[in-house]
Image (cartoon, rainbow, N blue to C red):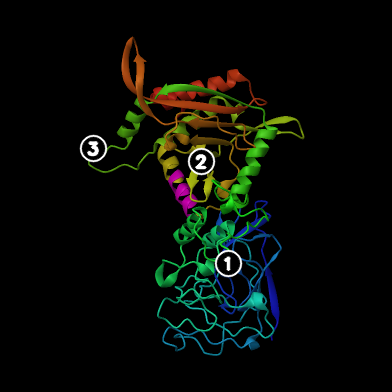
Amino acid sequence: MGEVREFALPDLGEGLTEATIVRWLVAVGDTVRVDEPVVEVETAKALVEVPCPYAGVVTSHAAEEGAEVAVGTPLVTVAVSPGAGAPADRDAGGGERAGESGTGPELEHVGGSGNVLVGYGTAEPPRRRPRAARPPGAGPGEEPRSAADRGAPAPGPGKDTGPGTRSANGSTGGPVPVISPLVRRLAREHGVELRQVTGSGPDGLILRADVERAVHAAQGGAAQPGASPHGAAPASPHGAAPQSAREGAGLERRIPLRGMRGTAAERLSRSRAEIPDASCWVDADATELLAARKEMNAPLAHGEAPAPVSLLALLGRVCTAALARFPELNSTVDTEAREIVVLPEVHLGFAAQTDRGLVVPVVRNAHTLSAEQLTAEMTRLTEAARTGTLTPAELTGGTFTLNNYGVFGVDGSTPIINHPEAAMLGVGRIARKPWVVGDELAVRSVVQLSLTFDHRVCDGGTAGGFLRHVADCVEHPAKLLRTL
């Protein structure tokens, strides 16, 4: 066997020290090229693909999907010797790909490219990776994964499953037809034996709904597949009595505090522990603000549609105008020097809800942007947050945060400051309510605004002045013209 090189999780920057393996992009036995992504990991900042600087045959994975690995910890080993004996890269018809020789996998630059940081990559990934024979002496942990584990459909009923695979009649042995690591984790948390679950997906693929049905059956007293001959449910992973045996009790769920969720927990705990925060709030009539936005987005005289302006961007513009008047709230506290550091630029963070949790993208130099520019940048960052492609730089360095929790249908909240910032403005839902206009009662669009601030950087007079200025701009948007 040729030279085997070990590739470790590289330094991801921004002070990140660990990542969670979400999905392996290559299996043991696959051939990889220089700078081809080999694994998808979730850091505290984003979901990223990590490229390998070596070309050759993957001989082992150092961790399973769902595992947490530290920077510098081995990820994969790659046999980089030209004598590794891997087959040539071939197309679906079995022939060699056009323009390539059949002398074996591409193994030039065996010394590595050096481009090991997240986001680097210079080579196009192959359309189909050739499968090499398992390296001599490989242990059980280096067994090539099944097609189901790599994302391909598992063999279905009536197909030749081959020796050691799970057949249609539920016999065990070999890999289980599961693609999603979330399904595996759900089954592990609830003690469900996947080999005894009948998949309802294509070709017998086990879906999340299949595992949930098995959990429900166990909770309802039905005999769970894989239970002991006496009908007892599997023991919990913590050594306690089986959960389903507890009358009227549900199954315990444990959610790891790692990745983005863990970072958020640490930051929120640190904020509560270090920052003496206080809150104030006020109701504001947002009728004129909504009317102004409608007018901004109306077609122009010649019928051309203007660049859209979002309500969140208008509120962001209001925040930058208020911070220009009350700069103490755009600051941070240097605890070692015992100094308040008032910051010259406004890097505006805004809360965005995603499938992987709450993230706070940051609009750089928001005080220099118009409402149209703020809308465009917030739209771009929100889409990147939902797809998991935000860079660490786009998630750090904020100086003030805008939190629009009104999208969840709630009126008010007391936000927790995004450490190490000094303040956060919360915006509730805009609802039609009775409101006194002059001496008359009218129905208006009313919003509750709340400000949580670090009492070390200012007193209630400054915080109240800031919040009142924000409310005045919401009620009378023309006040913003003073700051343009």
Over which residues does the magenta segment extend?
378-387
- Say whether residue 278 is magenta: no
Residue 141 - label: none
Residue drawn at x 53%, y 70% is 195
- The secondary element bearing badge 2 is classed as loop
What crowding class fits label 1: few (fewer than 14 Cα within 10 Å), some (14-19), or many (20 or more)?
A: few
The answer to whether the residues at label 1 and label 3 have Cβ atoms under 8 Å apart is no
Residue type highlighted by circle 1: Pro
Q: Which residue is mark 2?
A: 351
Residue 229 - label: 1
- Say whether residue 384 is magenta: yes
Q: Earlier in the sequence, mark 1 or mark 3?
A: 1
- The secondary element bearing badge 1 is classed as loop
Residue 230 image offset from top left, x and y in percent: 58, 64
What crowding class fits label 3: few (fewer than 14 Cα within 10 Å), some (14-19), or many (20 or more)?
A: few
| Residue 463, image quadrant | top right
- The secondary element bearing badge 3 is classed as loop
Residue drawn at x 41%, y 67% is 201
Residue drawn at x 64%, y 23% is 458
Residue 124 image offset from top left, x and y in percent: 51, 73
Residue type highlighted by circle 2: Ala
Residue type highlighted by circle 3: Ala
Residue 162 image offset from top left, x and y in percent: 50, 83
